[in-house]
């Protein structure tokens, strides 16, 4: 009974999505909005195919994704370590927390101008900016996760005279993993945003740069196609991470 | 022991001191790291001649306009979707496919439609701010005590007053959290759009200062952006605490 209803709703969802695209096509064909700004889905699809033929889809996508990935990995490693250190060590917290509290609300894109001054319009600059912006969610998640180790576990570890490294590795880190994962996912979205922004600003090859170029020369179908490809990239990276999280954290549901 | 409270200031203060000394003695490159004293002077000048304040007003104007539009759309859509599981099943997948498109990817599109100016910035900010509000509103409405809705049904309340007297008050505290998240997003996106290409506001000021090789002005504006973001967030937190606390379950019943 339930599954039949579920199936019906799934069909309705697909029909809705199709209807949106169809309306888009109708509106574009009727020229409600000038086709310069508002190409139809068929023209957009045509532009996508043409871009694919020229090799303007996967190559730029790979360079955007790669830069995003480097920055994100750097940010994640630094965020986990820093967050853990701040959470578990009083002196580190006392020295670093105010500085970080000042840096945190700074819009990540605001450090692009100084980064350009230091590093020029390079890939290194882009990765630095991405890493800076993507750092904070991981850091906060890791901090929260390492803080919330149940006191019984801490006492237990003390009673067993666990070395502090072993404590971090066997107790604190597993406890913090769910929070870290939440942070890491937010970071990935931010990393993609900053990858696109730095491309537009610094003329690095990539999808963001391509859609800006398409705009500058008023090739709106290519602009739409590029934007959608970016959305697909965001969708799949997030999806991959959700899957990875489910796998890595399987023990949590198993032990309950 | 005396140091205790000021330990947090130790690293920033010594960094600034080292920076000043390094710049004075010429160890640090002057064209990127101008000295803190110069930065202070540049910031003070920009504050006095009004250019910094004008840029701040421009940035916040776009951010607030976009936030207002985005929140309104997010709340209305969120209430509809939250109240109707069928609607969620039908519309949800489409929204989930659109959501991962990063807001900045819309910058070229917005530029194509509106050209430079406030409107294109507001469009991008609106898109970016819809999502946090929408997601929080859906889950807030879903979390409303079902008995309240049943009571409304029994009383045959008209839809509008049901919204006003039951749904909104019950969901308001959590929606406010979503709006606060969106407010932060709005400011970030505003600055980003300005840095990338819109010639107005704080972000543009920074990038122009950097490109015209006036690093001291750029650093001053960077500090100002940080301060503005912090002040904005504090303001929102205060509003939240003063006026919205009472809507929270377990908050005081009277203000």
Image: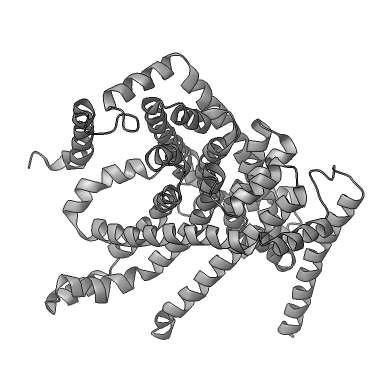
Residue located farthest toward the left when viewing the structure as drawn:
B1
Q: Which corner quadrant holds the N terminus of chain B?
A: top left
Q: Position of residue A27 (x, y in %)?
A: 87, 51
> Is B59 located above or below residue B123 in the figure?
above
**Left or right: B18 as drawn, with respect to B138:** left
Residue at 54 percent across and 29 percent down: it is B201
Residue located farthest toward the front when viewing the structure as drawn:
A54
Q: Position of residue A219 (x, y in %)?
A: 75, 47
Residue at 26 percent across and 58 percent down: it is A87
Residue at 30 percent across and 29 percent down: it is B30
Q: Position of residue B80 (x, y in %)?
A: 71, 56
**Left or right: B149 as drawn, with respect to B53:** right
> Is B44 located above or below residue B204 in the figure?
above
- Which of the 4 quarters of the picture holds residue A108? top left
Residue located farthest toward the right when viewing the structure as drawn:
A30
Q: Is residue B103 visible?
A: no
**Please, which colouring scheme is shown?**
one colour
Q: How many marks?
A: 0
**Left or right: A98 as drawn, with respect to B118:** left
**Left or right: B47 as drawn, with respect to B21:** right
Q: Is residue A35 visible?
A: yes
In the foreground, A96 or B117: B117
- Which of the 4 quarters of the picture holds residue A74? bottom left
- Which of the 4 quarters of the picture holds residue A6? bottom right
Q: Position of residue B76 (x, y in %)?
A: 69, 50
């Amino acid at each position: 009974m339930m599954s039949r209803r579920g199936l019906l709703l799934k069909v309705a969802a697909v029909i809705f999505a199709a209807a949106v695209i169809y309306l888009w096509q109708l509106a574009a064909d009727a020229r409600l909005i000038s086709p310069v700004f508002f190409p139809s889905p068929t023209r957009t699809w045509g532009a996508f195919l043409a871009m694919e033929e020229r090799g303007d889809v996967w190559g730029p996508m790979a360079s955007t994704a790669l830069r995003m990935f480097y920055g994100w990995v750097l940010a994640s490693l630094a965020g986990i370590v820093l967050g853990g250190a701040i959470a578990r060590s009083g002196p580190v917290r006392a020295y670093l927390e105010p500085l970080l509290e000042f840096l945190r609300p700074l819009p990540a894109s605001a450090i692009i101008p100084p980064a350009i001054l230091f590093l020029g319009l390079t890939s290194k600059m882009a990765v630095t900016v991405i890493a800076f912006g993507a750092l904070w969610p991981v850091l906060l998640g890791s901090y929260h996760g390492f803080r919330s180790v149940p006191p019984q576990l801490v006492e237990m570890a003390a009673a067993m005279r666990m070395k502090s490294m072993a404590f971090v590795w066997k107790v604190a880190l597993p406890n913090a993993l769910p929070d870290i994962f939440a942070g890491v996912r937010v970071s990935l979205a931010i990393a993609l945003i900053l990858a696109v922004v730095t491309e537009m600003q610094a003329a690095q090859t990539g999808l963001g740069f391509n859609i800006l170029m398409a705009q500058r020369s008023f090739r709106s179908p290519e602009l739409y196609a590029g934007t959608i490809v970016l959305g697909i990239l965001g969708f799949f990276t997030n999806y991959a991470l959700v899957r990875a999280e489910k796998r890595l954290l399987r023990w949590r549901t198993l032990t309950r | 022991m005396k140091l205790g409270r000021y330990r947090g200031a130790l690293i920033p203060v010594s960094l600034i001191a080292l920076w000043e000394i390094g710049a004075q003695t010429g160890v640090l490159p002057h064209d990127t790291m101008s000295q803190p004293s110069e930065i202070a002077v540049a910031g003070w000048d920009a504050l006095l001649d009004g250019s910094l304040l004008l840029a701040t007003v421009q940035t916040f104007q776009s951010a607030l306009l976009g936030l207002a539009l985005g929140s309104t759309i997010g709340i209305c859509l969120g209430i509809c979707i939250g109240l109707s599981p069928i609607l969620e099943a039908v519309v949800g997948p489409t929204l989930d496919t659109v959501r991962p498109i990063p807001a900045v990817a819309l910058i070229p599109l917005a530029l194509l439609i509106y050209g430079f100016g406030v409107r294109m910035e507001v469009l991008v900010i609106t898109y970016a701010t819809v999502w946090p509000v929408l997601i929080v509103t859906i889950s807030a409405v879903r979390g409303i005590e079902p008995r309240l809705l049943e009571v409304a049904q029994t009383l045959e309340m008209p839809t509008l007053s049901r919204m006003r007297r039951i749904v909104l008050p019950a969901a308001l505290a959590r929606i406010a959290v979503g709006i606060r998240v969106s407010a932060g997003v709005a400011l970030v996106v505003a600055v980003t759009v300005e840095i990338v290409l819109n010639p107005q506001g704080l972000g543009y000021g920074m990038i122009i200062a950097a490109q015209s090789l006036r690093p001291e002005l750029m650093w001053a504006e960077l500090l100002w952006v940080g301060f503005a973001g912090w002040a904005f967030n504090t303001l929102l937190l205060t509003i939240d605490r003063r006026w919205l606390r009472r809507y929270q379950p377990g908050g005081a019943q009277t203000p």
